[in-house]
Image (cartoon, rainbow, N blue to C red):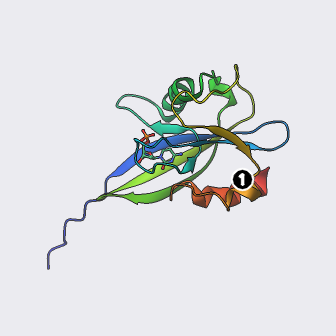
Amino acid sequence: MTNAVVPNILLPVVAAALVDADGRVLLQQRPADKSLAGLWEFPGGKVESGETPEDALIRELEEELGIAVPHACLAPAAFASAPLGDRHLLLLLYIARKWVGVPRALEATVLKWVRPADMHALPMPPADRPLIGLLDALL
Ligand code: DCM
């Protein structure tokens, strides 16, 4: 008996739950010209070749929000996965409570600060959605 070859390539994606003093978390709305358009996501993106996940997240937060997050302020919190074509996206979520600068929507349509309990009512990407419960319990 031979084993079927099943494509099982994991695509690493990193994202941040930026938490403000009131326990709200920053979400951004994906623009119309991108996949998953209109959905509300934790800011972040793909880990590029040669990057550590933390380096990738610091780069993405600078590109997307114009903020600087010190490496020491990124706390690994949770992960989740979702099918993406014939691959699986593996989303690594970090929590950050401190950063430098004021987040601006440099790539997203709009930003908003949301309590975890209120995220259930928002359309979110499939890999982001399972992380709501963890944030609700933690914050
Ligand atoms: N992605 C996601 N959740 C996030 C950030 C990104 O599911 N919080 C997904 C959307 C894309 C891929 O990661 O499939 C790469 O993101 P982008 O299109 O923003 O580069």
Q: In which quarter of the image is residue 54?
A: top right
Q: Which residue is drawn at 59% across and 44% down?
A: 42
Camera-side residue of 66 and 100: 66
Q: Position of residue 60 (x, y in %)?
A: 51, 29
Residue 77 to residue 96: above or below: below
Dot 1: what SS? Answer: helix
23 displayed left or right of 126: right
Q: Position of residue 6 (x, y in %)?
A: 24, 65
Camera-side residue of 58 and 117: 117
Q: In which quarter of the image is residue 2?
A: bottom left
Residue 3 to residue 82: above or below: below
Q: Where is residue 101 in the image (x, y as percent from the top left)?
A: 69, 19
Q: Which residue lies furthest to the bottom in this view?
A: 1
Residue receiving disc 1? 135
34 displayed left or right of 136: left
Q: Residue furthest right?
A: 22
Camera-side residue of 110 and 25: 110
Label 1 neighbourhood size at 10 Å, few (<14), some (14-19), many (20+)?
many
Q: How many labels does the image show?
A: 1
Q: Position of residue 132 (x, y in %)?
A: 66, 57
Q: Classify the position of the N terminus by image quarter.
A: bottom left
Q: Which residue is drawn at 77% across and 50% down?
A: 115
Looking at the rendered structure, the kind of residue marked 1 is: Leu
Q: Which residue is drawn at 84% across and 36% down?
A: 21
